Amino acid sequence: MTYKNSKNFSLTCSLIQESKFFEAKNLLLKDKNQYLLDDFFFHILGFLEEQIGNNEQAINYYLESIKINSNFNESKFSLGCLHYKLKRLDEAKLIFLNLIQEETKDIRSYYNLALIFFEQNLFDDSIKYLKIASNLYPESYEIYHQLGLVYEKLKKYNEAIKYYITANKFNKKKDSSTLNNLGNIYGYLKDYEKAIFFYNQALKCNGDKSKIYNNLADTYSDIGDLEKTIYCYEQSLLSNPENLITRQRYIFYLLYNFDTNKFYKQQAIKYWEKIEYLSNSLKINKLKNLNQDTQINLGIVSGDFRRHPVGYFLMDILKHLKNDNIKLFAYSDLEREDDYTESLKEKFDIFNNIFSLTDKDCATKIFNDKIDILIDMSGYSNQTRLSLFKQKVSPLQISWAAWLATTGIEEIDYIIGDPIVTPEEHKDFYVEKILQLPNIWCHLSTSDIKQISTGHTPALNNNYITFGSFNNMHKINNKVVEVWSKILFLVPNSKILIKNFQVNNYLYKKRIINEFKKNNILENRLIFEQASTREKLLHSYNNIDIALDTFPYAGGTTSLETAWMCVPLLTLRGENFVSRCGASINSNLNQDHWTANDIEQYIKLAKEYASDYKKLDINRTYLRNNSRKSTIFNSKLFSINFANVLRKIWLDYVNNKKNI
């Protein structure tokens, strides 16, 4: 008698349906001696061991089944699938190849062979077997979906789209994967309207909504729609609150939001509460016998040692810091370096590339380098290494310049600011202590900028005012457009020049034009310029009369470049670090009268300054005579102040430790 005909078979099937695999296994094992020559009996035992997780025992039972009956293909197929699951791809491949020789219409084996070849990056073979399978079963969602995946991997997007659309015709289970992947492809092709359409269709189906909302958020970010970007990240977190990558991006974009101060610190702290770290086994270096002349080992961690604001901040001050008895260590999390990276390397004593290193290996390197003070210059950007700082890999740790808000990490001791961007009354916004530089929080290097002449106010020749903003698109939110529209309305014939690298993005440009239209400003008042070389970008400042700062996220590097090109900056003093950068720059230029305290004053000042071209030119002449000589661009003075602050906190740290 075979096991299929036994009195326990139906009970075994019931237990399997109820996922009671242990009970089913024990039931079978009681009868094992009766069915030593029953291929199906050992097949079921193999299945049960696999469900329990005893994979090696499952393999033995499948082999025993095949040994009893070399023609029992079901056990062969199950054995192949288990090898595939265990990533024993070559063993699985041999089994499936054998099966299709025995049965030329074995669709499942063709499909699994295609999956194996896909994982081995043998895409032509994968396509070959998928097409055989599709001919045998021309209405298979899974086969066409996999064909789409292969062609997507090959970046043959038109073919991928064709197969994904075919797959969706047979998508009886309403799985969201195909529609989500179509959204991804149209995102690669920068056809954002179609990408958004397919992501929204995917949300109506079954599947991981967190992933789809993430993709939607990234797409809205690409077209500069900040409100929808933040909304989609929030929806993603509702679906999967434990997704730390999503939470990191959410925190990043919150910094651009109007309500940041209400819960930003709380969100940053919450992020780190969800991350568990083993206690750092490295002991902090023994204290040096330190005096005022002792060399300090200063480490800087960043993924932006390149043509980027971080690179521009550092270039001119590093040589001065070296002269101040500071040994400089770079920890670069940069995958692709550029010419600016090469120049920066020469400024450091030791330049380490940590891109391929784990946090553990990084921590060991920093420990072995005996770093005294470690500075983060990445924050929550894509190149973040804040996890290193969470482990307290250095006696003193600082956040500076790249992230203008709290990190939420108590192990970071200080955030560097100045009296305007980080006044003492704002200390509750940070988990770090505020460390104020006397003049300005950062410095723009100018030694590598070619000499570019600055002209008179363009309105003298144009006979109309040209406002301008060269800020990142995420800073030009709907409220900013509303306020700028009021200014354009109040200043007859005026125009606004918007220049950034996103302008060549059709949907971004369309969104901005539509936002101005909603506020009764037609497209003929708008001038768009695409990204250019830095030299051409700086030349473009000569085409604007007044730079309009963004809010609540004010310009940083952009506003410093505005000052270098002697263009007056109208800015709004906000309630946090990112919203007060323009106010700090204006203060250092003796241009406080260009800083508004609220939106009403911002609009009023714009109208007032735009009404008198001669006065505007007098102010521009003042800037031409004074801005480049200001504290903003004095790299030696900035470096002295910076080094003095670092030495003071290090001495305080050492003295406190000695007194414990």
Image: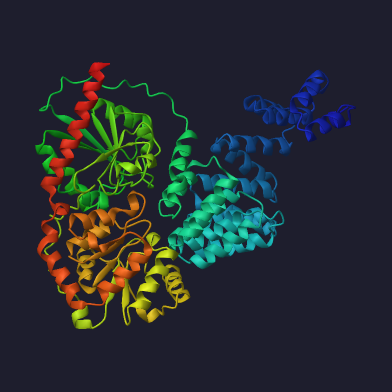
**Vertical side of 376 occupied by 163: above or below:** below
Q: Is residue 196 left or right of residue 370?
A: right
Residue drawn at x 46%, y 41% is 266
Percent coordinates x, y for residue 597 in the rendering: 33, 59
Percent coordinates x, y for residue 86 in the rendering: 57, 34
Q: Quadrant of the C terminus?
A: top left
Percent coordinates x, y for residue 628 in the rendering: 12, 59
**Vertical side of 468 occupied by 110: above or below:** above
- As rendered, which of 342 and 565 lies closer to the eye? 565
Percent coordinates x, y for residue 319 in the rendering: 12, 43
Q: Is residue 502 left or right of residue 210?
A: left
Residue 271: in sight, yes or no? Answer: yes
Residue 124: in sight, yes or no? Answer: no
**Vertical side of 328 occupied by 288: above or below:** above
Instruction: Check the image and tell me how it is coloured.
Output: rainbow
Q: Quadrant of the N terminus?
A: top right
Q: Is residue 310 left or right of residue 214?
A: left
